[in-house]
Structure formats: structure tokens, C-alpha cells
Amino acid sequence: MIVPRLALVADRSPAVRSHVRLPALLAALRDRQATDLDAYWIPTEEVPASRLAEFDGIWLLPGSPYRSEAGALEAAGTARRAGIPFLATCGGFQHALLEYARTVCGLTGVAHAENTPEAADLLIEPLACALRGHQAAVRFTAGSLVQRATGVERSMERYQCGYGLNHRHLDTLAAHGLRFTGHDEAGEVRVAELPGHPFFLATLFQPELAGDGDEPHPLIRAFAEATAERAARRRTTG
């Protein structure tokens, strides 16, 4: 029997609430959803040697600034190119967009303000109002992956974030296939997804912080299901 293999890409730290939540969430997926995932923590600096393409799912977790920006970008790029189910939350959202802008859109000079604040062209910039410890409504586009996974068109989500997308390049990202399917009440981008990919979802909010951790957020359940489905296909074809 092939157990789905999940890569948790982040520089694991007990100071990051998201990281602390993961063991309980994985246990809840196993016990409540009968989805048992074989999860491996992969530090960003070890991504190049980690053979990520052999995993059934990749989760680019919060915890930026990462020790290796290049490693975080490679994780997003590997999932995108190989069709591996991919979830990116908070800092993961930011770096998934950065990888897409540089690699797919040709915006090779764009940067992340947390990593290179002196850069002339920031794709990811400080939020006018930081969302650390904040909870706010997010509206989802009807028929989108995020809307289908949650089953609602509006939900309250938790943040622990100080950076977001600079709208200057939004049209370019959209023109190259990225779809923005979640926005706050002021219209600011909070979710991005990639149509045609088995499961590619990036959220500025952190679904892993929902509730008390005993019941996984619908997006985490959907991501786990997509990861298990990839493993099942490997079993039937390999």
C-alpha cells in the first residue's frame, strides 16, 4: 500500500504557531477523514537535495523570512511544473506568487520586501495595515477551486501576516494564467490558484489556524484528498 507522501516545506520552529498546529491537524485528518499522510519536514535550504518531485503533495508553510528564498521558490516551481498538489499559506502564498512572476511572467527583477527591502521593484510589499493576529472576511469567486473546496462564497479567516501583493503586477500575473479568487472586503487579493493544475492553491490567510485544530479547515481537507488521489494514481500506474 502506498501511503501519500507530503512535503512540509518550511524552517520548522516552535515559535511559529502554524508549525505547532501541524501534528494535531495531521492526526485529525487520519482519525476524522481516514486520510493518513506520511509527512516530512523539509527546511528551505535542503529543498534542492530533497527530491520534491517524488512527493504526492507539497505544502509551503509560513515562517518567512525563510533561510533560503531560493528553496521556497523551488518548492513552488516544482509543484507547479510537475502537477503535484500544492498548498501555500501566508509566506508560502507570497513566495508562490514570486516564483510565478519571475519564472512564468518573465518579471525577473521583482522582489519580496521582507527579503530585499531595498529592491526597486517589489512584487510583495508591506501591507498598509499588518494582519498579525487578525481575523477578517474573505469572499471567494463562485466556481473557483477555493469556493468549491470550502462550499461557501464568504468565510472568516485568520492571518499572521505583514506582507501582500503589490497590485502593480496583478494584471501581468493574471494575463499569464494565474487566477485571483479570494478578496477581502476592500478588494485586496487573498487567494490565488492555477486553473488546469490538479490542485494549486495559495492563500494569504492561514487555514491551519482555524478553530482549535481538532477539525481541519475545508481547504486542508481538500488538499489532503488531492494528495491521496495522486498517491492512488501512482499505485495504479506504477
Image (cartoon, helix red, strand yellow):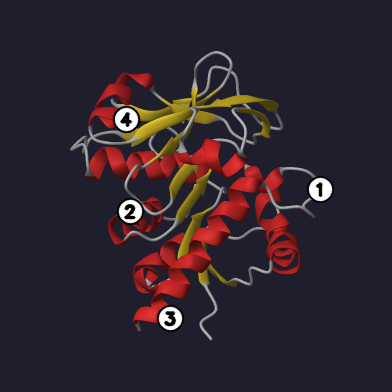
Query: Which of pointers 4 and 2 indicates the residue nearer the eye?
Result: 2
Q: Kindly state the secondary structure of the residue where label 1 is placed.
A: loop
| Nearer-the-camera pick, 116 or 171 | 171
Q: Position of residue 185 (x, y in %)?
A: 58, 16
**Which is more N-terminal, label 3 or label 4?**
4
Sequence-wise, the earlier of marks 4 and 2 is 2
In this view of the protein, which residue sits in the foreground, 139 or 119? 139
The residue beneath circle 3 is: 235
Q: Earlier in the sequence, mark 1 or mark 3?
A: 1
Q: Quadrant of residue 179?
A: top left
Report the side of 151 relative to 97 (left or right): right
Disc 1/disc 3 C-alpha distance (Å): 34 Å
Q: Report which residue position mark 1 lands on.
A: 212
Dot 3 surroundings within 10 Å: few (below 14), some, or many (20 or more)? few
Q: Which mark is residue 119?
A: 4
The amino acid type of the residue labelled 2 equals Arg
- Tell me the kind of residue under disc 4: Ala
Asked where in the image residue 101 lies, by quadrant, the reply is: top left
Residue type at mark 3 is Arg
Residue drawn at point x = 40 percent, y = 80 percent? 236
